[in-house]
Amino acid sequence: MTEQIRGVQVNQGGENTQVNHYHEPPRPDVWPKRIGAVPVLASAFQDRAAVRARIAGPAVVLSGGGGVGKSQLAASYAIQAIRDGVELVVWVPAARAESVIASYSGAANQVRAAGADGADAERDARAFLDWLSTTERSWLVVLDDLHPDHLGDWWPVSHTGTGRVLATTRRRDAPLSGGGRAVVDMDVYTPEESATYLTERLGTFDGTGAELAEALGHLPLALSHAGAYLINEEVSCATYLRLFRDRRSRLGDLMSSGTDTDQYGTQVAVTLLLAVDAAQAVTPMALPALRFAAVLDPAGHPESLWSSAAVSQYLGGDGRSAMRLLHRYSLLTHTRETVRMHALTGRAAREATPDLDPAVGAAVESLLAEWPEVDTDQPELARVLRANVDALETQVGDLLWRDNRDRVLHIAAESLGNVGLYAAALTTSRRLADASTSHLGADHERSLSARGSLAVACHAAGLSTEAVRRGEQAVADCARVLGDRHRDTLSARVNLGFLCRAVGRSAEGTALLEQAVADCAELLDPDDPIGVAARMNLAYLYWESGQVGKSIALEEQRVADQERLAGSRHPNTFAAWTNLASSYRQVGRLDEALELGEKAVRTALAVLREDHPETLNCRSGLAVTYFELRRFAEAIAIEEDVAARRRLVLGPAHPDTLQAEKNLGMSYHGVGETERAIEVLERVVATAGEVLGPDNVEALQARAVLGDAYLLARRPESALPVLERVLADCTSTKGAGHLDTVQAQVSLALCLHRLGRSGEAVLLATKVLTTARQVLGDEHPATEFARQVLALCQPSP
């Protein structure tokens, strides 16, 4: 039996691809649950009784322009649900599909939805929807700022009648009213509501207040700006109205009609500028602080960004005090650890106070400083940071392609893969590769890096053939532009060496990695991630090709280095233990393999989740050791569980799923459960050949065992074409003297004998026995098997 040892990939920039791991302690299952940050209600919040009365039924969409108070009304609805004892209330920022998926994925973990394991965010999100559809618990999901494109895939449904969905959107697309959803249009305040608001906020209201409300278009957001100004500056409505009209006349065409789609932008721009003038009189940091908040995500950003060194340098002072000043003037909202700026306020700030370049630079640096070392340690923070990167990309466009700022786009793309959003990571990586070429030129170092990262993303998404093709191009481009010995070229070659193995080009991968290891030793620090990855991947290819002595030397070095640099609880450390255990096992050092394998599993279970990919890798390796120790039941139980989990999380065609099922089929074959082995292996061979290409290594290994299983089942006619293909593939990829080639020849000789072609069988068995003696030695098990098959094929005297 053999199993895949996971290789290590590096980014083109040379840093390790992050390993997802968790440090979440067991927690009690406490109800009711509140998930997501429900916005705090504004001062003098208006309940909008006429609109609220229409929010009935299981599925409602609040539709209206920016600044009319949709999110505030939805927040009041959620707060009332909490007061009423609804068991689950979930607030979801829904402007982007990735935010919806991430929120649902986190909720799946909170409610312990069946099938949610933390390894694949999209799979977990669907598990949460399944849970919502069948639970008897009462629930409310609020989808704030929903994009209609998300309706079909991510709209929750309750089949038990215990759940409700409330969405807010500025869109008025036809699909909003489908699927049993009731669309409730929401507009600005009525004159009576404006009067009530100003009365509650200011303690007084007169004819001038009514005139002011009319000038502000009864827009709740503009009234909020004005109310804060009136209170902070202690001026009358008449004075503010005069200031408003004067500033509006001077504003001119700054707010272009083409961008003011809601027809409220002018009122908001004027009230914003008046508030900024007042705040700027308090501190010159007010205007740059406004610009900083305006380029970030309206759904919110971490308060901690304001304490970063980049923001302090940009503002020339204490960022948090500037942020709190903007909060006083209702230009943003600071609640607990989150800061929000209304989308319409942000747009007005960007259009009415240009020169955003310094703010963008500060935003990029503060986001990079805040990014967690391991995304899955703080998944909600990683999600919020990715959403803010998306907002930057959407709102400031070309400014992200100056001064190396686009590196935050690369970090965000890698983060998607780190948290299991493989499809989103692939889509983002494709877009980033194209954008890099467009903005920087095809030969710029970061364009080369983006294309190399795309190759890695293709592999993670199961597209091994495309991954190799793109990896080859990345190596060629880096070598042409940067030189063959540049660090990024080394990184690309290491990745390509790893990728080649997945499509059956192990000899080529070995040659690439041998050269990369030598170059890394000459050019890089011994602990450089590129060199570490090169040695790990080369160790595996040595292991796979039967050069176990070379493999063990590299792996023992890696274990010592990893324990010294990262400690025993780092995922890379117990992955290194698993790899070394595999090599020990291959040379018969089973006691050492068992000790390392069990230690790896124990540590993985303590540090990671049970279903985390690295935990499954460790368990797979231990299962092989159990099998070699003839602990068959334990081995097969682990392999059945690992295969089922990978099939559920990754899908049937992912390389990791195929590897797990191949291992399971081999174990079934090894204990004589031939029909079960054939069933599993036929599926692996067909799927791998169709999805990953006919030369995929998992398909090759599965075909070899499938041929033997056909023989064991007395089906030599089925075995013959399979074994002929296996022998041809092994000869071309591994050479005539490789153990796998010898075994393939022996199996084919036995098959020919059972088909009555004894003459051919004797010739082949004689040939392979000679080769086995020369290459493997007279005492090798494969040599003995060849001897037995030859005796069987020869006619009796």
Image: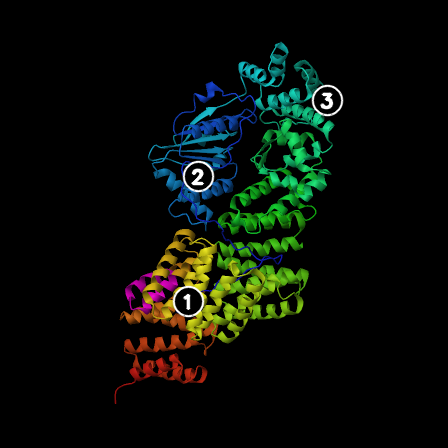
- Return the residue at label 2: 154
- Which of disc 1 and disc 2 is earlier in sequence? 2
What residue is rendered at 45% in x and 82% in y? 775
Query: In the figure, 201 relative to 522: above or below?
Result: above
- Give amino acid for label 1: Leu
Range drawn in magenta: 661-685
Q: Of discs 3 and 1, which sits in the foreground?
A: 3
Q: Residues within 10 Å of mark 1 (few under 14, many from 20)?
A: many
Res 526 → quadrant: bottom right
- Give amino acid for label 3: Arg
Percent across and percent down for residue 21 are: 50, 53
For the view shown, which residue lies furthest in the top direction? 207
Q: Is residue 498 magenta?
A: no
Q: Is residue 475 visible?
A: no
Q: Which mark is residue 250?
A: 3
- Which of disc 2 and disc 3 is earlier in sequence? 2
- Give amino acid for label 2: Trp
- Return the residue at label 1: 700
